[in-house]
Amino acid sequence: MKTSANHLAHALRANMRPDQPFICGPHPLTYGAFWQGAERLAAALEISPGDRVVMQVEKSVEALQLYVATVLAGGIIVPLNPAYTRTETLYFLEDATPSVFVTPTPEGWPVPRALTLEALLSEARSGFKPVPRGPEDLAAILYTSGTTGRSKGAMLSHRALASNAKTLQKAWHFTAEDRLIHALPVFHTHGLFVATNVVLMAGACMDFMPKFSVEAIINAMPRATALMGVPTFYTRLLKAEALSQAATNMRLFISGSAPLLASTHQEWHARTGHTILERYGMTETNMNTSNPYNGDRRAGTVGLPLAGVELRLDAAEAEIGVIEVRGDNLFSGYWNMPEKTAEELRPDGWFITGDLGQIDADGYVTIVGRGKDLIISGGFNIYPKEVEAVLDAMPQVQESAVIGLPDKDLGERVVAVIVLKSETNKDAIIESARQNIARFKCPQDVHFVDALPRNTMGKVQKNELRIRLGNMG
């Protein structure tokens, strides 16, 4: 479909007020300056429509401008966690085949053009006109680890990102008067597409923090109206004595990316008088459900399907089933993986999430488990098979099983259960793992056993390990 406008960029700047602040705080930036900088970066990219731009940089306003610049230039942004090792990064580059790779270490990568963000900024120039792109054109590829260990690139269209941002803006009552505390990373959907896109769509402003800091957030609250975070944010903020007084000016606290404990929900309300609004989404679907802005925000649930999102369980008569969703918010499939796309995305548009859930009489959705063997720690997705492959490659290790155990701070902590073939210790295992995978994926605890529990088919019984180790405290 031909179009004369850049669909996502047009939607994001619909409420733009050029002279109003987009970034608040000690280093303010107006909307006009932000978009002008993005247009100048778009000219420096020198890409063709559909080209991939991989961004693996630390959080900064310039990183946000690079995202928008790629969209303006008709490209596809591919954000990567800066914590990834070189081996991990090489896989993404070989799979995405980008034209441009923006990285602090540009030497020796198999891409046509690798350069630092500073170098790209030095090439920025004026006079760029947005490249027309339609709703179905791709705007981003976000990699989400697969249970087999091979990461999958979820393809997100202009429509998926624009429609979800508009839906969330309305659902959460964001206006130009809002000031969001942005302390999330910008390499995954929560910080880049939920927080940033909603603020842009509303013409609001944000306190843009380089990383999570209890002190910085507490200090920002008296001037702010909203916070988006992962459950770990809230458990850590609850330890601050100044929380109750600081939160009085706030109107909304949103939690996602991992399950929020009911006890955290209740303690937050007791301390601040505010009820955390929990929602549910995925890389492949953007946001699917949300507790209501006006109405009953129920602890332990992820609320009701958002406007324009259909949600069902795979077995209509079952009390618990695998959640399936359909709507404009969905991804377009997995990059270079048509077979995997066909497995999880039905021909009639329903996506099989792999999450187990139930729906109560009022329509509230509760996530009760995961069909996929996923650990969510501090808001980050970790697939055990990837960690197990690293552990099993160690000469001292015969075999391993990686599980998640409840953690009051992180939601879940990564625990490795290992059968040894030669002597070593926990510290050596953890240190070796850190050489091969990102730190957030590494085991935080290691248990040595004589044998892993298995069923009659030889499958490791991870539930038994969770019970056994959970009972150990």
Image: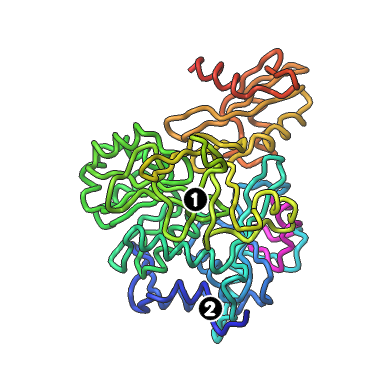
Of residues 459 and 223, which is closer to you in this image? 459
User: Residue 399, how many percent across, how many down?
Assistant: 74, 24
Q: Residue at x 70, y 53 (%)?
A: 342
Tag shown at residue 73: none
Estimate how packed mark 1 is, as few (under 14), some (14 to 19) or many (20 or more) residues with alpha carbons within 10 Å: many
Q: Nearer the viewer, mark 2 or mark 1?
A: 1
Residue range in magenta is 89-107
Query: Label 1's element?
Result: strand
Of residues 397 and 2, which is closer to you in this image? 2
Please name the residue that numbered disc 1 is placed on: 311
At label 1, the amino acid type is Leu
> Considering the image in quadrants, where does the N terminus appear?
bottom right
Please name the residue that numbered disc 2 is placed on: 39
The Cα–Cα distance between marks 2 and 1, rounded to whole angstroms, is: 38 Å
Q: Is residue 203 above or below residue 236?
A: below
Query: Label 2's element?
Result: helix
Q: Residue at x 24, y 42 (%)?
A: 272
